[in-house]
Image (cartoon, rainbow, N blue to C red):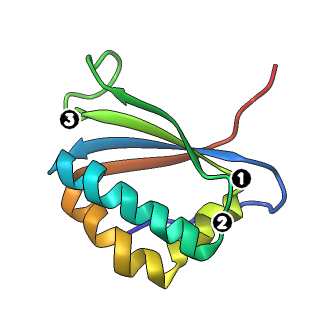
Amino acid sequence: MIKLPNIEPGQGSVLMLNMIKFRDKKIYFEQYIPAFNRVVQQLGIEGVSVKLVSKVVANIVAGEDEQWDEIVLVEYPNAEAFITIAQSDVYHEIANPLREAGTAELKLYMTRKIDF
C-alpha cells in the first residue's frame, strides 16, 4: 500500500528514492518498467525520468535486516504527478501487479533537491 503525502502544490520537482529488494529482477525491469512507462504516457504526464539505477554493494550504516539489492532514483516534475500516477486506476491495473511480482520489499521516499 502506498502512503500518499500531503504536499503543498507547486513546489517543483521531486525525486523518488526507491530502495528495492527483488523477488524477480527480470519481471521488475523487463515488465514493470515498460508497463509503468505506458501508464505515464496514457496519463499524459511529462517530465518523469530515471536519474540513477545503482546496485547496493555494502550495508554500511543500516540494520542487519536492511539488505537492499538496488536503489532507483526517479524524478517527477512535481509531487502531484507522482500522486496522480499512484492513485490512478490504470497504474493499479497495469503496472502495480508487476511491481508486486518483481519486488520482495520496497521502501519509497519522496525527496526534493536542496541547492546550496
Tell me which residue sits at (55%, 66%) in the image: 40
Which of discs 3 and 2 lies nearer the camera? The answer is: 2
Q: Position of residue 72 (x, y in %)?
A: 43, 38
**Amino acid marked by disc 3:** Asp
Mark 3 vs mark 2, CA separation in Å: 36 Å
Say left or right for 55 vs 115: left
Q: Which of marks 2 and 1 is nearer the N terminus?
A: 2
Tell me which residue sits at (58%, 46%) in the image: 49
Mark 3 vs mark 1, CA separation in Å: 33 Å
Q: Name the residue under label 1.
A: 77
* Circle on res. 87: none
Q: Earlier in the sequence, mark 3 or mark 1?
A: 3
Query: Dividing the image into 4 quarters, which one contains the C terminus?
Result: top right
Marks 2 and 1: CB-CB under 8 Å?
Answer: yes
Indicate the secondary structure of the residue bearing disc 1: loop
**Amino acid marked by disc 2:** Ile
Q: Position of residue 63 (x, y in %)?
A: 27, 28
Q: Residue furthest left?
A: 23
Q: Earlier in the sequence, mark 3 or mark 2?
A: 2
Circle 3 Cα neighbour tier, 10 Å, few/some/many (<14 / 14–19 / ≥20): few
Total residue callouts? 3
Q: Residue 36's quadrant in the figure? A: bottom left
Q: Name the residue under label 3.
A: 65
Q: Vertical placement of 28 versus 64: above or below?
A: below
Indicate the secondary structure of the residue bearing disc 2: loop
Q: Mark 2 points at which residue?
A: 45
Q: Vertical placement of 90 versus 29: above or below?
A: below
Nearest to the observer: residue 23 or residue 90: 90
Nearest to the observer: residue 43 or residue 17: 43
Say left or right for 6 vs 72: right
Circle 2 Cα neighbour tier, 10 Å, few/some/many (<14 / 14–19 / ≥20): some
